[in-house]
Image (cartoon, helix red, strand yellow):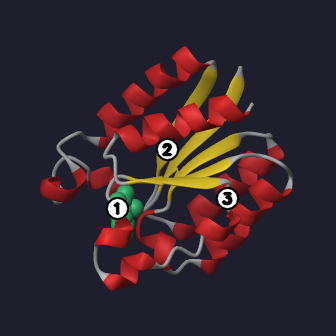
Amino acid sequence: MTRVLLLNGPNLGRLGVREPEIYGSTTLAELLESAVGWGERLGLEVDGRQTDDESELVSWLHEAVDTRSHVVLNPAAFTHYSYAMRDAAAQVTDVGLLLVEVHLSNPAARESFRHTSVVAAVATGTVAGFGTDSYRLALEAVAARL
Ligand code: DQA
């Protein structure tokens, strides 16, 4: 089965309690469980992870390259300023793997600092603003491109 690393950045471990009016009431554990099910139906083996640590996220992107895994990435706040993560994400798409940037909210409709994504230009594409459905749509996009 095609492997997909579903990577989540800082504070996403707080889903369910963090600003539910923006991010919804689904916990990360529930979201990752749903994502495994969506993946199974699409023929994708989804390995979902979350970290608050930039270096760990960078190392997981390196792992995606080394294991030839596609990536669905919610970089959370790293989206807006982490050039280290951006450079690691670029290595994923440089070798021909897919990398879909996802966001639960629509950053373009929020504070101005969220309008910049340093990852978008090296991603295959972006899905934002559909809550947990952003992840389902991102997995569907990966499956459609295989
Ligand atoms: C987010 C949007 C980011 O601006 C924010 O820092 C997050 C979550 C989203 O999924 O909507 O932590 O990536």
Q: Nearer the viewer, mark 2 or mark 1?
A: 1
Q: Is residue 111 above or below residue 20?
A: below
Q: Is residue 124 left or right of residue 120?
A: right
Q: Is residue 109 above or below residue 2?
A: below
In the image, the residue with mark 3 has its CB under 8 Å from the nearest atom of ligand 1: no
Question: Could you tell which of marks 1 and 3 lies nearer the N-terminus?
Answer: 3
Amino acid on which disc 2 is placed: Arg
Q: Which residue is mark 2?
A: 49
Q: CA distance from mark 1 to mark 3?
A: 27 Å
Q: Helix, strand, or loop for circle 1? A: loop
Instruction: Name the spot of residue 32 as percent of width and height, x first.
Output: 41, 34
Amino acid on which disc 3 is placed: Ser
Whether residue 102 can be seen here? no
Instruction: Name the spot of residue 137 as percent of width and height, x first.
Output: 48, 37
Crowd band around label 1 with a 10 angstrom C-alpha radius: few (<14), some (14–19), many (20+): some
Instruction: Name the spot of residue 7 as percent of width and height, x first.
Output: 53, 49
Q: Is residue 131 left or right of residue 1?
A: left
Q: Which residue is mark 1?
A: 106
Q: Which residue is mark 3?
A: 59
Q: CA distance from mark 3 to mark 2?
A: 12 Å
Crowd band around label 2 with a 10 angstrom C-alpha radius: few (<14), some (14–19), many (20+): some
Crowd band around label 3 with a 10 angstrom C-alpha radius: few (<14), some (14–19), many (20+): few
